[in-house]
């Protein structure tokens, strides 16, 4: 990649005042509350009677994706900046995105497994997101040949834990309780909040980069390529893991979608709505990678779902 483009990306400056930060955090909490409205405790009972798919899904998303993302960042070398690499690692450290449940339903995958994997990865991300980002972020900065004065990455694990617990843990718990004890209310709120999540993310991306739109447009083709490669890797990890262990076809589809769709809205909230990364120099690459991931995985999710459905039609036609 052209060094001028890399510099332009890393120097993108996106800032929010306290009011903007609080708005992002509040809306994200509502989005996660909406995700939890579709979760019922009995789903976990059914899925855990045959735990193989759940265990493999968690390994694919929480262990293999961050690991292979780190290896991909190392392989890309000077083609990406340290900031873009950390953006890739941050996305891979986030839990599954809530639209994965919709994509699983669309592609006739195992929806109960999808909901369970989303719920479990979201619950575990309170610990796994800060840990994976700290581990692979530091490994990258230690072993990559970086021609920049980047300070040692020090992620305050306790601060990240508290932030994620407030943003995700509390809304998730309230949503599950609402689904269990107020099912009619949960059913009425579920779809509007799912649409809110998509609208919220797109609005957050547009508003965040509006003041830097010219610079962003100059770089978007490079960002598109990096995110495309990264997302294809994520989808391949999910499908390959499920295929290697001979999971049923519906479960293979679910693992593919769950690993390929990440909650990049959480990544943006951590970057924009907190002071956790304030010790780093300008890191626009992290912001752009995380933001574009959230846009692109909607496109890739719909594409993969369509391919699965096309496969079914061809099979029926034989």
Image (spheres, rainbow, N blue to C red):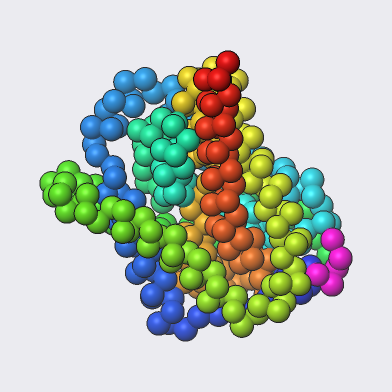
Q: In which quadrant of the rendered view does residue 278 lie?
A: bottom right
Q: Which of 231 and 307 is in front in this view?
A: 307
Vertical relation: 302 (above or below) 311: below
Mark yes or no: residue 95 visible: no
Mark yes or no: residue 297 visible: yes
Vertical relation: 250 (above or below) 3: above
x then y, percent, for residue 126: 41, 51
Q: Which of 104 and 60 is in front in this view?
A: 104
x then y, percent, for residue 114: 41, 36
What residue sits 47% from the left and 64% below the top? 201
x then y, percent, for residue 73: 73, 49
Whether residue 3 appears in magenta in the rendering, the answer is: yes
What residue sits 84% from the left and 72% below the top? 4
Q: In this view, does 54 lie to the left or right of 170?
A: right
Taking the view exactly as shown, the residue that stands out farthest to the right is 2
Q: What stretch is highlighted in magenta?
A: 1-5
Whether residue 210 appears in magenta in the rendering, the answer is: no
x then y, percent, for residue 193: 32, 58
Secondary structure mostly seen in the magenta stretch: helix
Vertical relation: 71 (above or below) 269: above
What residue sits 46% from the left and 26% below the top? 250
Q: In this view, does 196 lie to the left or right of 142?
A: left
């Amino acid at each position: 990649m052209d060094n001028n483009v890399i510099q332009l990306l890393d120097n993108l400056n996106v800032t929010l005042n306290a009011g903007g930060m609080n708005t992002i955090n509040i809306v994200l909490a509502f989005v996660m509350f909406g995700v939890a409205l579709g979760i019922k405790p009995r789903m976990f009972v059914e899925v855990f009677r045959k735990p193989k798919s759940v265990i493999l899904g968690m390994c694919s998303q929480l262990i293999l994706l961050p690991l292979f993302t780190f290896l991909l960042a190392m392989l890309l070398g000077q083609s990406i900046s340290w900031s873009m690499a950390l953006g890739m690692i941050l996305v891979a450290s986030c839990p599954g995105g809530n639209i994965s449940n919709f994509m699983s339903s669309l592609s006739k995958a195992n929806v109960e497994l999808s909901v369970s994997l989303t719920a479990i990865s979201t619950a575990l991300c309170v610990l796994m997101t800060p840990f994976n980002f700290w581990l692979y972020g530091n490994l990258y900065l230690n072993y990559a040949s970086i021609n920049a004065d980047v300070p040692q990455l020090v992620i305050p694990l306790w601060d990240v834990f508290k932030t994620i617990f407030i943003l995700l843990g509390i809304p998730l718990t309230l949503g599950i309780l609402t689904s269990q004890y107020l099912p009619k209310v949960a059913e009425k709120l579920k779809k509007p909040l799912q649409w809110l999540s998509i609208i919220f993310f797109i609005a957050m991306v547009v508003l965040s980069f509006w003041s830097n739109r010219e610079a962003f447009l100059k770089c978007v083709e490079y960002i598109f390529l990096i995110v495309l490669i990264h997302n294809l890797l994520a989808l391949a990890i999910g499908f390959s893991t499920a295929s290697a262990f001979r999971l049923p076809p519906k479960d293979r589809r679910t693992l593919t979608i769950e690993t390929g769709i990440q909650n990049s809205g959480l990544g943006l909230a951590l970057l924009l709505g907190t002071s956790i990364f304030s010790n780093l120099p300008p890191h626009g690459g992290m912001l752009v990678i995380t933001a574009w991931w959230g846009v692109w995985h909607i496109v890739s999710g719909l594409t993969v779902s369509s391919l699965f459905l096309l496969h079914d039609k061809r099979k029926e036609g034989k």
